[in-house]
Image: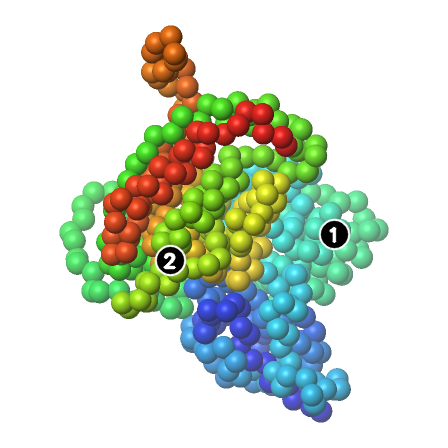
Amino acid sequence: MAQVELRMPKMGESIIEATILSWSKEVGQEVEAEETILEIATDKVDSEVPSPVDGKLLEYRFKEGDVVPVGEVIAIIETEAEVDSEAPVNGQPHVEDVPEEVAQHVPYVPQAEPVAEGVATGGHSPHGSNGRFYSPLVLNIARTEGISMPELEQVPGTGREGRVTKKDILAYVKTRQAQPVVVPAAVAPAPKPVAPTPQKVTAPAPVTYNHSGNIEIQEMDRMRKLIARNMVHSKQTSAHVTSFVEADVTHLVQWRARVKDQFYKQYGEKLTFTPLFVQAVARALREHPMINTSIDGDNVLIKKDIHVGIAVALPTDNLIVPVIRHADRLNLAGLAAAVNDLARRARENKLRPEELEGGTYTLSNVGTFGNVMGTPIILQPQVAILAVGAIRKLPSVIETPAGDLIGIRQKMFLSHSYDHRIVDGALGGRFVRRVADLLEAWDPETPV
């Protein structure tokens, strides 16, 4: 018998530790290769750690709620399989080698979908309406076999707390092929159990207030706590100033309306306004390098690469910021593909940890929610962030050689928040004005 050390995997360049949320296997239980051993959480994503071999869980060295450094031995697996002496002793694959089904997850959000469109997938929530957790491996098998979430909820589970294991779903698939499928009628989802919060956010002692009236107390989920901590940290770190500019984007709106169908046929991507904004931001950053910086003590770090983060709202109403790397090197088709891909996988919770790191500037499109402007908070360690508001038809003064006229124009506000420690009003104002000028000067004859 050989023993394999299962170590805490590295889930991204800046990740140095992770919290153990729960153990999926008990000591002494048999495990299969790629079967989930435990669930972990970092400050960016939640993930499942699979077994690297077939065997038996001999011991685990940490309990639920413990914060464990990357690379630390967390469990010992006894196996009859041959272990390569030159392979890493932990038996744990690197992040890039982890199977696709080892994915992060977000809390369940009920969705009223037809059964035909409700096939269980890795992109759906890992919790059913009854609150039961489904691993990404089980969801992928269900997706492959065309099993909808209501049907999956009827599969009996033999795992911990009644969870459906790989063996359970495969056994169900065999019996399902010989029997007609009966999908239960949709019912109102049961309240989801409150997920454990193994690590408390470090913060000053809160002030106690007396509340009265009809109040429901709801604890923040883990992601909301992290967002709250990061936002407060940013306000305490950076001297925030916001400049506003109004832009006339009539030519841009008209051009997009005219070419968006052709663009989709030619590139297979929907042309939203976001890649157009990213293109203008990337060009303006190249012209204003002091905006593409960060502060390290008394030193200014001028970033030579332009990596633009795009804020994406999740179905849980939380926020995540995936990064488009080298945005200034991509043409419009490349930017559209990057924006659509990152936004889709962000909402499906399929982003890799490294796709959330390394941003040098952030764009937040608050116009998608019908907001006309906002005062965004800087994402540390960046020194600026741009919010673009809703595009609206407004009466405007139009200057012509024959005189001024009143006409209907497509207009929007751009809100640029920047760190006054390094960016003064002149530079911050010039930058956002340059972005607006690039959008206003869009050539209606620009080829697709």
Closer to the eye: label 2 or 1: 2
335 relative position to 434: left or right? right
Q: Residue 27 bears which disc, if any?
A: none
Q: Residue at x 40, y 53 (%)?
A: 289
Q: Taking the image as drawn, is residue 300 in sight?
A: yes
Residue 114 lies, in percent from the top left, at 64, 36
**Quadrant position of residue 117:** top right
The local secondary structure at tag 1 comes to: helix
Q: Residues within 10 Å of mark 2 (few under 14, many from 20)?
A: many
Residue 358, compared with residue 35, is above or below; it is above
Say which amino acid is labelled 2. Answer: Thr
Give whichever of 248, 137 is nearer the camera. 248
Give whichever of 400, 387 is nearer the camera. 400
Q: Residues within 10 Å of mark 1 (few under 14, many from 20)?
A: few
Q: Taking the image as drawn, is residue 27 in sight?
A: no
Residue 400, compared with residue 155, is above or below; it is above
**Residue that numbered label 2 is attached to:** 293
**Residue that numbered label 1 is attached to:** 144
First in sequence: mark 2 vs mark 1: 1
Residue 262 lies, in percent from the top left, at 67, 28
**Quadrant position of residue 398:** top left
Q: Residue at x 17, y 58 (%)?
A: 207
Label 2–label 1 contact, CB within 8 A = no
Say which amino acid is labelled 1. Answer: Thr
Q: Residue at x 30, y 41 (%)?
A: 429
Residue 27, compared with residue 427, is above or below; it is below
Residue 88 lies, in percent from the top left, at 64, 83
Residue 242 lies, in percent from the top left, at 27, 43
